[in-house]
């Protein structure tokens, strides 16, 4: 019944997805178009401003954010290709723009932003995309998607419908992987130690893939896996769902 | 002199490499989590309990002027001497004054993080007094001449072997790894100290305004002995410990126990309301309460972060913090470690000196999620970062983020930078993981994915062009 509600979806592709993980964005476009929606990607936008915001440089974050607010003001619905950037647009913008002339625009934007998996399950009511991915996987909850946006079930519901896929939950799936944006390079020793714990939990499951809704977490985890020559691979949820 | 940030980083490097330490802490905290979850399950609705607790603390903290006066009035009516200390130095002077007036030599103490905050033990020992910690964990770290490792579990970083070794060295006991025997060794020493101590010094978990009482929560009975046997007893507490009503304990005692140790209630919960009253057979002859501000009122004046004064020092945020679980408590170099320490230390001891703790977080939010009084801990870390950068921006970072904003907002610039990066990455293998590598912070331990041959934006443009 939800399928008839065809929409014009504005897809927000964060900087690191654009530059390093284009397949994640391409998979999302593929999935959304297959469902019959029209997809638009504003070419003017490259980043949500979170690196500046998280580092304490809110003025510079606002400079980036204002442009995001302007570009997205007429969007029907905004789908964000990352839980973390989704949290920035949906949650942190209202804090960032509190007491500025953009308060209202930020509040308005928040109501029409969805992280990708949340958009599919909650907004569209779609759970089975007809995907096939014969592998054992484990799912890592990105912190911003989980705690700022409250997305826990969405990805798991989507994965449960993927043919051939076996989801094995890891111990402490909700514990941070240690990426944390600039934290990863400011305190690399702590970030790395946290990542090692995450890799060990994932490996313990015997899974072949770590799936997540956030390429930033996966970039960090994959970086560690590659350095340590693990066999385990990381893959974004959208890439799994686009497989047939 | 090395700065606090360098000390922090140096210790963090050491501790994250210490796999034995990491394993010890993580194993202990995983057990805590399992027990805590079970106990939380016995609440009818944990989330409503958190909400109620947060509202009660909000009421207390936002009406501190009224409740403190009520609390003090009730205490004084029963003959308690109440002292107000604006600073740690004043609190120490007050305590020294009482000790000297009584010609006291020896002090027995139960657990009080406020006394750590004002470095009371060091000052007392320096002045030639004998001071003995009666909480087992505190007793052990005192023998090791260490600060408590954790607000609630001061000696959680030590194995039985470590404890046996320090007992053997300092108390001359025979080595053993039997926990009961270890406890008995401490007990024999401590029982004697309670009887001979001139003064008992306690902290407080809650201060009940309605009845003028101090509530102390513990598992060993040591605080009871500390408060009951010596003739003079002093309680040192922060002004934020206030709860409006006695009945609030019905919520707060189980909440503190559940969050702190995973117990439904701790073994001993006592209320102290003053010195021995006429007709009573026990209790101290003299009872003093020292109320400590030590810049708490500055936090109170900050409407954005005032809720950090809700903290009941349960340690739950430390227990779930993946940073704490990998670097441990001593690395912070503060009285209060973990997320709550990172939030309040900049307020208590100076933002510029302690801002690094707010940056040493992945902002995962596990702390905020677990906090029983709903302090928005990780958002406060963000606010501390903002305040620090606003007050004293780093020239390099400020320039970098200005440049970042400039590039991001200009698609042409963005494409140019992408091109430069793509060219430069061809030479990256020459430097990768070496100190000269501009991405050394990342590549020392991790591989960095390359910029894609065709980025999403390039793909999208091509697709659009093809369609037009």
Image (tube, coloured by chain):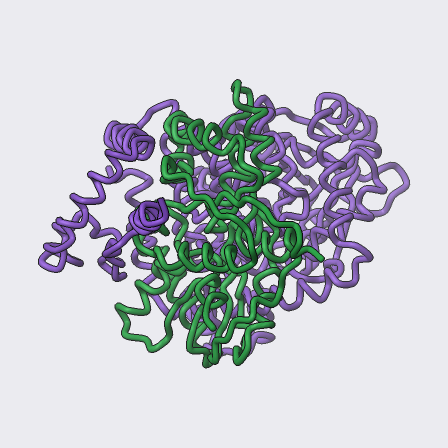
Chain colours: A green, B purple
Q: Residue at x 55, y 73 (%)?
A: A162
In the displayed structure, A49 sits above or below B94; it is below
| Quadrant location of the N terminus of chain A in the rendered image | bottom right
In the drawing, does residue B76 fall left or right of residue B386?
right
Is B260 in front, or is B335? B260
In the drawing, does residue B400 fall left or right of residue B304?
left
Q: Residue at x 65, y 57 (%)?
A: A3
In the displayed structure, B120 sits above or below A144; it is above
Residue extending farthest front? B468
Q: Residue at x 32, y 49 (%)?
A: B466
In the drawing, does residue A50 fall left or right of residue B94?
left
**x and y percentages locating residue B303 in the rendered image:** 60, 24
Residue extending farthest right? B279
In the displayed structure, A86 sits above or below B400; it is below
Number of dots carrying numbers = 0
In the drawing, does residue A181 fall left or right of residue B105?
left
**x and y percentages locating residue B129 in the rendered image:** 49, 42
In the displayed structure, B95 sits above or below B182; it is above
Is B329 in front, or is A230? A230
Residue extending farthest top? A101
Is A66 in front, or is B306? A66
Is A209 in front, or is B363? A209
**x and y percentages locating residue A88 in the rendered image:** 49, 40
The answer to whether residue B138 is seen in the rendering is no
**x and y percentages locating residue B364 in the rendered image:** 50, 50
The answer to whether residue A6 is seen in the rendering is yes
């Amino acid at each position: 019944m939800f399928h008839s509600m065809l929409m014009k979806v504005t897809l927000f592709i964060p900087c690191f997805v654009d530059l390093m993980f284009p397949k994640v964005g391409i998979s999302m476009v593929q999935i959304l178009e297959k469902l019959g929606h029209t997809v638009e990607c504003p070419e003017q936008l490259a980043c949500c401003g979170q690196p500046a915001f998280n580092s304490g440089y809110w003025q510079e974050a606002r400079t980036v954010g204002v442009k995001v607010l302007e570009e997205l003001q007429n969007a029907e619905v905004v789908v964000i290709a990352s839980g973390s950037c989704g949290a920035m647009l949906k949650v942190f913008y209202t804090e960032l723009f509190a007491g500025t002339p953009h308060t209202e625009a930020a509040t308005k934007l928040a109501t029409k932003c969805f992280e990708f998996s949340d958009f599919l399950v909650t907004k569209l009511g779609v759970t089975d995309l007809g995907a096939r991915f014969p592998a054992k996987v484990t799912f890592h909850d990105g912190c911003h998607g989980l705690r700022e946006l409250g997305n826990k079930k969405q990805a798991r519901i989507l994965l449960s419908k993927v043919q051939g896929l076996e989801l094995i939950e890891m111990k402490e799936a909700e514990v941070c992987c240690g990426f944390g944006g600039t934290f990863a390079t400011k305190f690399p020793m702590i970030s790395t130690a946290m990542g090692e714990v995450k890799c060990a939990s994932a490996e313990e499951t015997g899974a072949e893939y770590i799936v997540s809704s956030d390429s930033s977490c996966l970039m960090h985890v994959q970086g560690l896996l590659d350095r340590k020559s693990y066999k385990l691979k990381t893959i974004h949820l959208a890439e799994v769902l686009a497989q047939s | 002199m090395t700065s606090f940030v360098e000390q922090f980083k140096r210790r963090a490097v050491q501790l994250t490499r210490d796999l034995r330490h990491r394993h010890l802490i993580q194993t202990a905290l995983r057990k805590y989590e399992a027990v805590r979850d079970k106990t939380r399950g016995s609440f009818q609705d944990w989330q409503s309990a958190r909400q109620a607790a947060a509202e009660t603390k909000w009421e207390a903290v936002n009406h501190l002027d009224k409740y403190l006066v009520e609390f003090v009035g009730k205490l004084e009516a029963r003959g308690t001497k109440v002292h107000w200390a604006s600073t740690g130095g004043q609190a120490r002077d007050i305590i020294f004054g009482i000790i000297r007036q009584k010609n006291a030599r020896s002090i027995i103490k139960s657990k009080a993080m406020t006394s750590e905050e004002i470095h009371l033990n060091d000052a007392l020992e320096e002045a030639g007094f004998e001071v003995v910690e009666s909480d087992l964990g505190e007793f052990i770290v005192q023998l090791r001449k260490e600060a408590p490792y954790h607000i609630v579990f001061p000696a959680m970083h030590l194995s039985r072997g470590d404890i046996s070794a320090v007992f053997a060295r300092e108390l001359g006991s025979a080595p053993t790894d039997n926990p009961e025997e270890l406890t008995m060794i401490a007990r024999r020493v401590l029982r004697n100290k309670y009887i001979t101590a001139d003064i008992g010094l306690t902290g407080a978990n809650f201060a009940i305004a309605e009845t003028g009482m101090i509530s102390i929560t513990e598992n060993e009975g040591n605080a009871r002995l500390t408060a009951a046997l010596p003739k003079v007893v002093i309680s040192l507490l922060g002004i934020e410990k206030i709860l409006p009503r006695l009945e609030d304990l019905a919520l707060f005692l189980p909440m503190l126990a559940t969050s702190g140790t995973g117990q439904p209630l701790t073994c001993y919960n006592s209320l102290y309301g003053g010195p021995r009253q006429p007709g009573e057979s026990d209790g101290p002859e003299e009872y003093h309460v020292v109320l400590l501000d030590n810049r708490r009122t500055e936090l109170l004046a900050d409407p954005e972060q005032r809720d950090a004064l809700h903290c009941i020092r349960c340690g739950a945020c430390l227990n779930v913090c993946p940073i704490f679980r990998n670097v441990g408590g001593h690395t912070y170099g503060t009285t209060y470690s973990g997320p709550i320490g990172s939030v309040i230390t900049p307020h208590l001891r100076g933002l510029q000196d302690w801002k690094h703790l707010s940056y040493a977080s992945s902002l995962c939010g596990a702390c905020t999620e677990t906090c029983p009084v709903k302090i928005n801990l990780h958002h406060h870390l963000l606010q501390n970062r903002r305040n620090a950068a606003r007050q004293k921006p780093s020239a390099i970072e400020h320039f970098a983020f200005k440049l970042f904003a400039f590039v991001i907002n200009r698609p042409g610039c963005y494409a140019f930078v992408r091109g430069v990066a793509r060219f430069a990455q061809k030479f990256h293998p020459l430097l990768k993981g070496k100190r000269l590598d501009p991405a050394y912070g990342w590549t020392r331990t991790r591989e960095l994915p390359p910029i894609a041959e065709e980025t999403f934006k390039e793909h999208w443009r091509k697709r659009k062009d093809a369609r037009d």
